[in-house]
Image (spheres, rainbow, N blue to C red):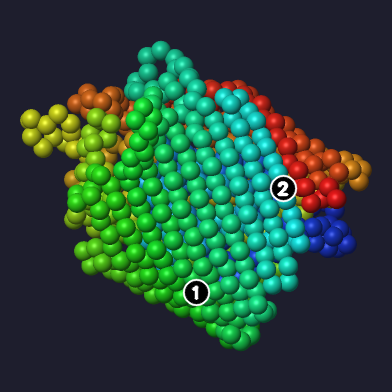
Amino acid sequence: MIKNIILPLALLATAQTAMAQADPELDDVQLDSIFRHYELEEVVVTGTRTPKFLKDTPIQTRVITSRDIARTDATNVQDLLQQELPGVEFSYSMNQRTHLNFAGFGGQGILFLVDGERLAGESMDDVDFSRLLMAGVERIEIVKGASSALYGSSAAGGVVNIITKNATEPWTLNLNARYAKHNDQRYGGVFGLSSKHWRNAFSANYHNKDNYNVTSAANPVTRVISTIYGERTVDFKDKLTWRPSDRLSIGARAGYFFRETTRTVNLPERYRDFSGGLRLDWLITKDDNLQASYAFDQYDKSDYQQLRHLDIRDYSNVQNTVRLLYNHSFGETAMLTVGADYMHDYLFNTYLAGAAREQDCYDVFAQYDWNITDKLEAVAAVRYDYFSDQSNSQLTPKLNLRYKPNHRLVLRAGYGMGFRAPSLKERYYNFDMAGIWIVEGNENLKAEKSHNFTLSAEYSRANCSLAVSAYYNNVINKISTSAPYFKSIEDKLPYLPYTNLANYRVFGADVSMQARWQNGISARLSYAHTKERLPKDKDGNTINNQYIPARAHALNANVDYDHQFTKRYGIYASLNGRLLSGTENVEFKNYYDVTEGTVRVKYPAYTLWKLSLTQRVGKAVSITTALDNLFNYRPKHYYLNAPLTDGITLQVGVSIDVDKLF
C-alpha cells in the first residue's frame, strides 16, 4: 500500500520544494492566475444560500466541477464521491441497497439536494443514489457540518447540492457511450438551446449492468454475498428558463427516472421517480432580490409479477414544496436573508399502520451576513421548523466566522445545531423484512439533535494550496433501530424497533493538498481521520449495527497530466487511488436466526486504484480507456460491508460534441 502512494506524495513534495526555492513575483502572478481560474473564482451558493466566491465563503465548501466529473467518468453520485472525497464509503443492506457513511454520518444525516431542492423517497434510510446521475451536472457543492439552520431536518451532518447545467450556447449536443464487463453499458445525450430570452437543457440516459456471481473464501464468520445485483436505469430531464428582462428569470423543470433490479426470478423490483418544479428569480432593485419556487417529487416502488404481467406498487412518497427567499444587501457591508418553506409530505406503504400517512411541515429562517472589517466576516442564522405529525417543533441556530489576514490565508470557525425529525416511516412502519425480522415503528420517537463545532485553515500560494480542518459532533437522541426482541414465545420472527439512542460522538480531521503546474501536471492528496464513539442504547448497551462504522483513516490520491500536442490531438491521463484502513463491526452470525447471537467481523484495510486515458481528437471527439481496480483487489469474504468488486475492470467510452463537428 505504501508503494502505491509514493508517486502522488513525491509530486506534492516537489511542488512544495519548488515553491520554497523559486518564488519570483512574476511566476507567482502567473501561477496564481491559473489556480484562481480553476478553483478560487468558483461561485458557490450552498453554504449561505447566496452567491459567493469560493475563497470568500465563511462556510468551508468543497466544489467538484464539471471538469472533475468528466475526468472521473462517474455514472452517478456514488461513483463520484468515492473517487473525490476521503471519508466516504458505501456499504450494503441484506438486499444490497446502498447505505452512505460520510465522516460518521449516515444517509439520514446528510441532505442531498438537486438545484437546492429536496428529494422524495428513500432506500434503507438513504436516498436512491442511482437516480443522481452525473450527466448534465455543472458542479457539486459539499458542505460538511450542521446546516439545519438553513436547510432544516436531515442536514445535521452536511449538505450535498447537485447543480445542473444551463444552456449557454446557441445549440449544443453531446452524445456519449461506455462499455465494461458484466454487460455494463451506458448511453447518454445532452441537448441545449439558448437565445436572448430562452434557454433549454434536455438530457436522456440509459444504463444497464447484469447480475454476476462472486466467491468467498471458506469459513466466513457471518453471512456472505454470492450474487451482486446489477440494474437497468432510464432517466430523462428537461430544464427551461425564460428571461424576459435582465431583472426577471422564470424557470421550469421536469424529470422521470426508472430503475429495475432482479433479485428474485420473475419478480423484478421497480423504482420510479417523477419530478417537476417552477422557479422565479426577481431582482427588484440592485439591493433586493426575491426568489419563489414550487417543487414536486414522487418516488414509487413496485414489484413486477412477470408471469401475470402485474406491476404492484407497494410504496409511494410524494412531496410538494413551496418556498420564498428574500435577500437585501446593505451595500458592501452586510446582507440579510429571510425565507420560508411549506412542504406536504405523503407516504403510502403497505407496511404502514393505516397504509398511508401524511404531514405538513412549515419553517421560517433568517440569516445575517456581516463584513465587520475587510478581514473579518460573521454569519449568523436561526430557523424554526414545525411538523404537524404530533405537533413537533424545533429551533436551530448557527454562527460562522471567517478571518482573512492576507490574500493567501483564510481561517474559519463555526458552531451549528443540527436536528432530524423522525420520519413517517420511523414512526409508523411495520414491515416483515424478508422473513428475517419485523421492522417496528415507534410513535414516541424524539427528534435527533446535534451540536457541531468546526475549525479550518486554508493557505494558497503560487500553484499550491493546503487546507486543514477539524470537527466535533455530539448527537443526542440518535434515531436508530435497537436490538431485536420477541414480543411473545409464540412469535416466529423477532421485532426490530426504532428507538432513540444515548449520545453519539464523532471527532474528525481533514487535510487536503493540491498543486497544478503550467506543464499540465496536477496532483491532489486528501486525508480524512474519523473517530466514532459508537452509539449505545439508554441502558448503556452497544447497539448492533448492520452498517459498517467509519474507517479511522482514509486517503485519496490523484495525479493527472493534460497536454494538447497539436490543434487536433491532446490527451488527459489520470491515476486515482483510494486507501482505507481496517475496521471492525459487530454483526449477527445469521441474520435469518438472530438467536445465534453476534460476532465481531473484521474488515481489512484495502486500496483501489483507477488508471484512465482520454484522447481528444479534434474539438469534438474524446475516447476514454480506463482500468478500474487496477491492482485487481478482491475481498477475501464478500460480507455485506465489503467493497463489491470482483477485480480489475476495463472500461471503454466515447464522447462526441456534435455541435463542434461543424
Q: Nearer the viewer, mark 2 or mark 1?
A: 2
| CA distance separating discs 2 and 1 | 32 Å
> Which quadrant of the figure has residue 622?
top right
Point out residue 366 in the picture as x, y percentages from the top left corner.
Answer: 44, 77
Point out residue 19 in the picture as x, y percentages from the top left corner.
Answer: 79, 52
Please name the amino acid that badge 2 sits on: Asn
Residue at the spot x=19%, y=49% of the render?
353
- Residue 339 relative to residue 47: left or right: left
Which label was assigned to residue 174?
2
Point out residue 478 in the picture as x, y percentages from the top left corner.
Answer: 30, 52
Q: Which residue is mark 1?
A: 292
Point out residue 407 in the picture as x, y percentages from the top left corner.
Answer: 71, 68
Q: Secondary structure at mark 2?
A: strand
Q: Secondary structure at mark 1?
A: strand
Name the residue nearer the viewer: 624 or 37: 624
Q: Residues within 10 Å of mark 1 (few under 14, many from 20)?
A: some
Labels 2 & 1 near each other (Cβ < 8 A)? no
Residue at the spot x=57%, y=75% of the render?
281
Q: Is residue 504 above or below residue 453?
A: above
Please name the amino acid that badge 1 sits on: Ala
Of the 4 image quadrants, the one containing the N terminus is top right
Residue at the spot x=65%, y=61% of the render?
200
- Residue 442 relative to residue 417: left or right: left
Q: Is residue 172 above or below residue 199?
A: above
Q: Earlier in the sequence, mark 2 or mark 1?
A: 2
